[in-house]
Amino acid sequence: MARPSKSAKVIQLEGNAHRTKAELAVRAAAEEGTLSGNGMRERSDVRLNLVAHKEFRRLRKLFQAIDKDDELYSQAINDYCLIHAECVAIQSKIDRIEEDLEYLEARRDEMEADDYFRLRSELYDKELKFSAQLDRKRDRKRAIEDKNLMNIQSALRSIPKTPETKTSALREALLGTG
């Protein structure tokens, strides 16, 4: 798989690119042209969902801190926040099923064996169904995270591999530090 192209800032930080200053200036201008200049906007469906709204506010602060608060990210971040809220809701259902299983286990002696095993089996089936839904939603969240610098691996891809060690050969020759 090919590596994604580096931004103009990253190329300038590396300092060992084969691109000219003019090419870097054109690239930087093109990158600036890809941003709208408007901040992220929260959709009404996200605003009405308390969990999604809280997550959106948290992410907007983080994106503002890294100068990535742009409206072009809004759709993905809004979707991410709704998926996050769905994950929280599914997890609460799983927790409730686990509580029901504990309650059922505590009442095991009061029930007939057939009823106990039928109810336990139904609860386990529901838990598996919700767990599968939760896994699918988490996979969707990870895909959005990968595309939007929201995890360590995707953020590291935008960092230069080596620090800038650019020294001028002419300066070294004139100063005699070579």
Image (cartoon, grey):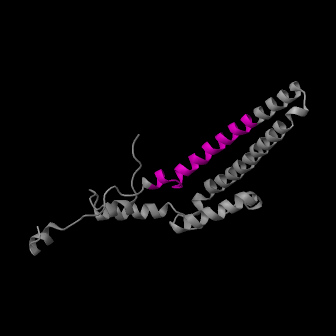
Instruction: Please state the horizontal and vertical placement of residue 152, each as a whole percent of the image.
Output: 48, 54
The answer to whether residue 174 is magenta is no
Instruction: Please state the horizontal and vertical placement of residue 121, each as a whole percent of the image.
Output: 79, 29
Farthest-out residue, bottom: 175
Q: Residue at x 81, y 36 (%)?
A: 105
> Which segment is the magenta one?
127-155
The answer to whether residue 137 is magenta is yes
Which secondary structure type mostly characterizes the magenta part of the structure?
Answer: helix
Q: Residue at x 14, y 66 (%)?
A: 169
Q: Quadrant of residue 123?
A: top right
Q: Quadrant of residue 19?
A: bottom left
Instruction: Please state the horizontal and vertical placement of residue 2, each as a whole percent of the image.
Output: 39, 42
Q: Is residue 65 left or right of residue 49?
A: left
Is residue 72 at least partly visible in the picture?
yes
Out of 72 and 85, give the one closest to the viewer. Answer: 85
Instruction: Please state the horizontal and vertical placement of residue 88, each as a whole percent of the image.
Output: 71, 51
Q: Is residue 87 left or right of residue 17?
A: right
Q: Is residue 116 above or below residue 4?
A: above
Q: Residue at x 41, y 40 (%)?
A: 1
